[in-house]
Image (cartoon, helix red, strand yellow):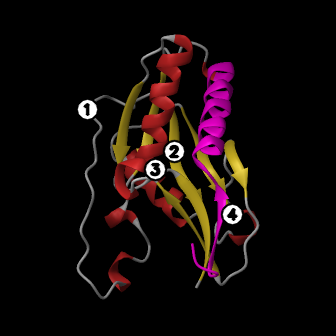
Amino acid sequence: MSLQEREILNKTEINILISRLTRQLIENHNLFQNSVIIGVQPRGIYVANRLQQKLKELSGIEVVTGSIDTTFFRDDFRRKEKPLLPSVTNLDFSIEDKKVILVDDVLFSGRTVRAAMDALLTYGRPSSIELLVLVDRRFSRNLPIEANYVGKYIDTLSNERVEVMWQEIEGEDKVILVKK
């Protein structure tokens, strides 16, 4: 790790946060009869999958889980210089009148969440949408969006970036703060 980055969460701390968030979901959604979990591509899906696994481990509940791509719903997609490569949307179930738990790794400006909600509405009209994030960068919103469930609040400067690393991609679970 360089002087430009600092570890915020390690694997054990991430597991503790996932367990706590899972218990909060169980309190509010009971048996998940009318609830679904949808991870925001590309990295929210790893949080969603961990929640799904922990729910099964703690309560035996197999909650319906999917993923949503926000690429063409973002307000900045036409401003990119490089060609956009969309991720996969995996919603092989109806979200009509469901309680949707939208899941992402980091909440920063709120733009990705807004795009995810727009994308979701093309698949139906849920009865409610809640937001769960592993990390909330509190003081950096461009839009009035707030998470219902937060693993950890991190206050950052404008020249810092929060990166969540996953075993499945980078070979280890951790969250780091990187100076740009």
Residue type marked 3: Gly
Label tally: 4
Q: Quadrant of residue 138?
A: bottom right
Disc 3 on helix, strand or loop? helix
User: At x 73% / y 72%, what residue is drawn?
Assistant: 156
Q: Which mark is residue 103?
A: 2
Amino acid, disc 4: Arg
Residue highlighted by disc 3 = 44
Label placed on residue 137: 4
Circle 1: residue type: Asp
**Where is residue 62 shown, x and y percent of the image?**
42, 17
Depth check, mark 1 against mark 2: the one in front is 2
Confirm whether the magenta stretch covers residue 68: no
Q: Is residue 46 above or below residue 100?
A: below
- Tell me the SS state at disc 2: strand
Query: Residue 3: within the magenta?
Result: yes
Point out the tag, 4 or 3, that comes first from the N-terminus.
Answer: 3
Q: Which residue is mark 1?
A: 92
For the residues labelled 3 and 2, say whether their Cβ atoms are less than 8 Å apart.
Answer: yes
Mark pair 1, 2: CA separation: 17 Å
Viewer-closest of 127 and 39? 39
